[in-house]
Image (tube, helix red, strand yellow):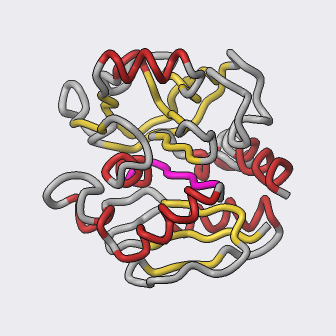
């Protein structure tokens, strides 16, 4: 499976994401600068990494969401290509309108950087196929603006449609209904605040993140 990592000025998890993808796919991903206007042909997965695109000036992900390559990312998502947004990538996806809601400043204001307990809410997506529903896993977070917000009607729709992929198993940032990750209506776009690329081998403290990438490779071929 061919994959790509979109690199924005300020990205700081792009190389971690590339290592995780190469480990899972056996091939180096394409590293695509945000000002490019075309994506490589034949991609099965596009990753928007964590970091601070444009230093998070204005609002987290707001400037990066208007980068030229994001038009191509949207078009690819509409064609069914899988898109994974982690941390700042999740913020980019909401700012670009690929996922509903917004990521607000953490409740309590503090930057949070530690391993957190998560519950897998759904195993019915390509991103979660190697987990069991309701399974408890551990993946690290590192963010200042991870407080997921949406109005009640949107939250009810996400819950009713089974689009909540992950929930926090503990109080982390004040997210509505403890939501840590959601998918789009078609199920091919996932945004999540925890960093699966930082939990792919024993030296990281576990491999719960690796299971996401292995599941994607199996599901997407």
Would you say residue 47 sits in the magenta stretch? no
Residue nearest the viewer, comparing 51 with 188: 188
Q: Is residue 39 left or right of residue 106?
A: right
Q: Residue furthest left?
A: 58
Q: Quadrant of the N terminus?
A: bottom right
Residue 102 spot, x, y in % from top left: 30, 38
Q: Is residue 215 left or right of residue 154?
A: right
Q: Which residues are magenta?
A: 82-88
- What residue is rendered at 62% in x and 40% in y? 187
Q: Quadrant of the C terminus?
A: bottom right
The image quarter in which residue 154 lies: top left
How many discs appear? 0
- What residue is rendered at 45% in x and 16% in y? 170
Residue 216 spot, x, y in % from top left: 75, 50
Residue 178's place in the image compared with 91, above or below, is: above
The image quarter in which residue 212 lies: top right
Residue 35 spot, x, y in % from top left: 38, 82
Residue nearest the viewer, comparing 183 with 112: 183
Residue 7's place in the image compared with 118, above or below, is: below
Residue nearest the viewer, comparing 189 with 136: 189
Residue nearest the viewer, comparing 161 with 102: 161
Residue 120 spot, x, y in % from top left: 64, 24
- What residue is rendered at 65% in x and 26% in y? 137
Residue 36's place in the image compared with 120, above or below, is: below
Residue 144's place in the image compared with 166, above or below, is: below
- What residue is rendered at 54% in x and 26% in y? 164
**Magenta segment, prevailing SS (helix, strand or loop):** strand
């Amino acid at each position: 499976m061919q994959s790509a990592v979109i690199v924005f000025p300020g990205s700081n998890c792009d190389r971690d994401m590339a290592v995780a993808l190469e480990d899972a796919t056996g091939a180096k991903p394409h590293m695509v600068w945000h000002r490019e206007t075309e994506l490589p042909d034949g991609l099965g997965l596009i990753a928007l990494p964590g970091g601070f695109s444009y230093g998070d000036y204005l609002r987290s992900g707001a400037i990066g969401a208007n980068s030229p390559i994001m038009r191509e990312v949207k078009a690819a998502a509409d064609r069914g290509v899988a898109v994974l947004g982690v941390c700042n990538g999740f913020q980019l996806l909401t700012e670009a309108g690929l996922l509903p809601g917004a990521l607000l400043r953490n409740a309590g204001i503090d930057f949070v950087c530690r391993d957190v307990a998560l519950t897998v809410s759904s195993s019915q997506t390509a991103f979660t196929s190697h987990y069991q529903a309701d399974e408890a896993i551990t993946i690290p977070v590192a963010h200042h603006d991870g407080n997921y917000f949406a109005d009640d009607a949107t939250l009810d729709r996400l819950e009713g449609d089974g689009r909540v992929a992950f929930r926090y198993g503990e109080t982390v940032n004040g997210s509505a209904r403890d939501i840590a990750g959601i998918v789009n209506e078609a199920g091919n776009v996932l945004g999540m605040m925890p960093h699966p690329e930082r939990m792919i081998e024993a030296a990281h403290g576990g491999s719960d993140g690796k299971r996401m990438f292995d599941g994607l490779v199996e599901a997407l071929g």
